[in-house]
Structures are given as structure tokens and as C-alpha cells.
Image: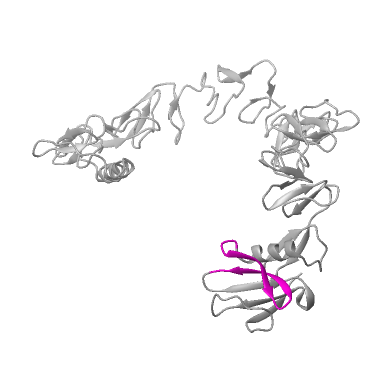
């Protein structure tokens, strides 16, 4: 009879796989009693590769019976190892899955779900494999759980490899004290101890406990990403006029961007930060100055459409009286046909322009939309005055009604 746990897992996995395949796929015409499973006709009642549902794969050795996976009576259990397919086993006798999945007996046999070790073999309860030869096993050398590490096991004793330090009583016994966090610089010196690494968390760097991210350079823990005397690696010093940036000596004020020094204040491809591109504009003081909203005037990023004076002065921000802003080089309080047109254009970019509209001895610029009409007058007593007609589209002069306003 199949194992209920396996059946539930297999069904859930199959449903997930079916969902991942996507909806709306073309269906294949299959004979009666069969189902289209990704372009293959399958009998979900008997196909061990599509048992119960499409892609419901049975364990190795199992059969599909009425849509349910069933292991044979001689191997009623199901076990799966990481990266391996599930298989039908008998936990009572299987030397690789004795009592529990993936619990191996090793140098012994499995009977009744328990390991029986061979003569002269050491039993290590709870380990897998459970039965080991402690005279030669580098993970259980002389005793269960005693590892040799950087060495070999012979006669129940560890022989350390060249360059490794023997730390008697520790496991592993043979350590590289330059990098071993449990034996850093010497046996038993643990980088986990606060006294050895008060800044914690820490690691072992060339036999010294250093905070994570720091490197031991001649007995001092340094950050090789920023240390001017140990830039990138120990002993590489940056010359006068340069500084260490992300492990590379760059001219002072520049930054290492993927191995190339860049000035983040002016570089179009790295404006303000590595990889921050400023296409079609100018990088000023680490900020992208791009039209149409901004324009570079000398060393200043300005709002507007052009630069004033010698090309280094920003345009003046004017208010059109109806809540919009327009920019030009005229000082505030300047009224003429040009500024009147600019004020009108800022109000409605889609309205109709009516230039030089006469209003009682003044000249005005009106702009009409489908529901409103506004007028800006630039000469005589009405200089800088305007009127908004919100009830119709007939132009009104200042003083004829509507809502009066000022502009500059």
C-alpha cells in the first residue's frame, strides 16, 4: 500500500507543476480515458509518470494503481535524498535508510530498523553512517565525532598535513590557524569570543580575529576598500593626490566604478552614483541637468529654456497670475508683447492665440479655450493687468467684468 505522506506530497508537487506550465496552452486530442499532459497522452490511473495528475511521478519501484502510487509490500516506505529521485525502500532492512530515511549503517547491516555493526567496528549513535572504522575514518578518528580536518587518520590518530597546526583535543584536530575561526592564530583562539573580536561579528584573517569585512595587514585590521595604505590588498599604498575608492587608488575626488575611476560630479554615465546615467544632459555637482525641465548655464543647473547674459545666468521665473510659471531673461516687472505672450502660453498650451487685441487704448494678448478666455495687457494703465472670463469664450478687457489679476 502506498505511503499517505508521499501521496500528498506527490499530489501537491504535481498541481504546482501543472500551474507553472501556464494556462491557455493548446490541448492535444487524446483517446478516451487518457489526458493531455504537456503534449503527451497519459492514463492518470496507471501511468507512474503521471499518476493521479499530470507530472505526478511515482517513486522508483512504485506502480500507479487507480491514480495512486503504491510501493511493493517488500519495500513499503518512500525515501528521497537531496538531488535524487524518491525510491521505495524497506526501512527495516535498508542499509542506507535504516529506521529513518538517509540513515546509513555504513560498516554494518540493518535489521529491524536498527544498525548492527561488524566486529571491531565502532558504533556512533545518531551519526550517518552509524558504524565506522575509528582507526582510519578522518571524521571519527579514534572516537566518534573526532575529525582530523586538514589531515589523515591512521591507527586511530590524526596525522596533520603540511602547513596545518595540531590542536589536540579539538575537532577538527588539524587546523589552518590563518583562517580557522575556532583556532585563529593559535589553538583554541575563537573568533566567536567577544574578547578576541569586541567589534563582532568577526572572522579569522591571516591568523588574527578581525571584524567581518576587515583584513589583517601586518597585525592591524583594516578595510582594504578604503584604506589608503592597504588599498585592495595589504601593502598597496595610494600616492599623493589619490585616495582608495572601493579597493582602487583613484585621483582625489573620483570614485571607483567597476574598476574605472570616475568623477561623479561631472560624469554623464555616472552622475552622483556609479551607473547613474544622465542622457542628453549635463552632470553638474552630481545632479543630472537635462532639458526640457532644466538647462546648464555655466556651473548652475537652471529651470527654463535658455541661458541669459554670457550664458552663465539663469532665466527669471515669472508668474502669469493664474498659477503658472514662465521663464525668460527679462527682469520682474517687465511688460511687453513678448512677456504677455509668454504669460498666456503658460496658462493654456492648447488654446487659441489672439495677438494685439485692442482694449481701450492698451494692447493685450488674449488666449481662448473652449470654456474660458483670459487676457494679459501690457501698456498704459493696464500694464501687468489681466482678466479671466470664466462664463464664456468672449474676450473681456480689464474692468469689463470677469476676474481681474496681476502678472509679472
State how the image is colored: one colour
Classify residue 58 as left or right of residue 109: left
Q: Is 383 drawn above or below residue 275 in the view shown? A: below
Rendered location of residue 343, percent (x, y): 69, 65
* Picture residue at 75% right of the left edge, 28% below the top: 206
Where residue 219 sits, quadrant-wise, is top right
Q: Quadrant of the N terminus?
A: top left
Asked if residue 73 can be seen in this view, the reply is no
Which residue sits furthest right?
Answer: 240
* Residue drawn at point x = 61 percent, y = 30 percent: 171
| Side (left or right) of 366 relative to 118 | right
Residue 42 appears left or right of 260: left
- Residue nearest the viewer, comparing 33 with 131: 33
Instruction: Say whether residue 366 is magenta.
Output: yes
- Residue 304 in sight here: yes
Decide: is 217 above or below 277.
above
Residue at image coords 63%, 73%: 374
Residue 5: x percent and y percent?
28, 45
Question: Which range is magenta?
Answer: 349-369
Image spot of residue 3 (x, y percent): 24, 42
Q: Nearer the viewer, residue 59 or 145?
A: 59
| Front-lying residue, 301 or 254 | 301
State which quadrant residue 159 falls in: top right
Examine the residues drawn in magenta and state their main secondary structure. strand
Give the vertical position of 314 relative to 95 (above or below).
below
Q: Furthest-left residue in view?
A: 32
Camera-nearest residue between 236 and 369: 369
Amino acid at each position: 500500500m502506498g505511503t499517505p505522506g508521499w501521496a500528498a506530497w506527490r499530489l501537491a508537487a504535481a498541481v504546482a507543476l501543472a500551474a507553472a506550465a501556464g494556462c491557455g496552452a493548446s490541448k492535444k486530442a487524446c483517446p478516451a480515458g487518457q489526458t493531455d499532459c504537456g503534449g503527451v497522452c497519459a492514463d492518470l490511473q496507471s501511468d507512474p509518470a503521471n499518476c493521479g495528475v499530470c507530472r505526478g511521478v511515482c517513486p522508483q519501484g512504485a506502480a500507479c494503481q487507480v491514480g495512486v502510487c503504491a510501493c511493493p509490500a517488500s519495500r513499503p516506505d518512500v525515501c528521497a535524498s537531496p538531488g535524487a529521485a524518491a525510491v521505495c525502500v524497506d526501512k527495516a532492512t535498508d542499509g542506507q535508510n535504516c529506521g529513518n530515511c538517509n540513515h546509513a549503517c555504513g560498516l554494518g547491516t540493518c535489521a529491524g530498523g536498527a544498525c548492527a555493526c561488524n566486529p571491531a567496528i565502532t558504533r556512533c549513535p545518531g551519526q550517518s553512517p552509524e558504524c565506522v572504522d575509528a582507526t582510519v575514518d578522518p571524521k571519527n578518528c579514534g572516537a566518534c565525532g573526532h575529525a582530523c580536518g586538514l589531515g589523515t587518520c591512521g591507527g586511530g590518530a590524526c596525522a596533520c598535513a603540511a602547513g596545518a597546526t595540531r590542536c589536540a583535543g579539538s575537532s577538527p584536530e588539524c587546523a589552518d590557524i590563518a583562517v580557522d575561526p575556532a583556532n585563529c592564530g593559535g589553538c583554541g583562539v575563537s573568533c566567536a569570543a567577544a574578547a578576541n573580536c569586541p567589534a563582532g561579528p568577526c572572522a579569522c584573517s591571516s591568523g588574527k580575529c578581525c571584524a567581518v569585512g576587515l583584513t589583517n595587514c601586518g597585525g592591524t585590521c583594516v578595510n582594504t576598500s578604503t584604506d589608503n595604505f592597504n588599498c585592495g590588498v595589504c601593502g598597496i599604498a595610494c600616492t599623493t593626490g589619490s585616495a582608495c575608492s572601493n579597493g582602487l587608488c583613484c585621483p582625489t575626488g573620483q570614485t571607483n566604478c567597476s574598476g574605472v575611476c570616475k568623477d561623479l560630479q561631472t560624469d554623464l554615465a555616472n552622475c552622483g552614483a556609479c551607473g547613474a546615467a544622465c542622457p542628453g544632459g549635463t552632470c553638474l555637482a552630481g545632479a543630472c541637468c537635462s532639458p526640457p525641465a532644466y538647462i546648464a548655464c555655466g556651473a548652475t543647473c537652471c529651470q527654463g529654456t535658455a541661458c541669459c547674459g554670457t550664458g552663465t545666468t539663469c532665466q527669471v521665473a515669472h508668474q502669469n497670475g493664474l498659477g503658472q510659471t514662465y521663464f525668460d531673461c527679462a527682469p520682474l516687472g517687465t511688460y511687453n508683447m513678448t512677456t504677455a505672450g509668454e504669460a498666456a502660453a503658460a496658462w493654456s498650451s492648447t488654446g487659441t492665440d489672439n495677438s494685439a487685441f485692442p482694449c481701450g487704448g492698451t494692447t493685450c494678448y488674449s488666449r481662448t479655450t473652449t470654456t474660458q478666455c483670459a487676457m494679459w495687457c501690457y501698456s498704459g494703465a493696464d500694464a501687468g493687468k489681466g482678466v479671466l472670463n470664466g462664463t464664456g469664450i468672449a474676450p473681456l478687457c480689464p474692468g469689463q467684468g470677469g476676474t481681474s489679476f496681476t502678472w509679472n
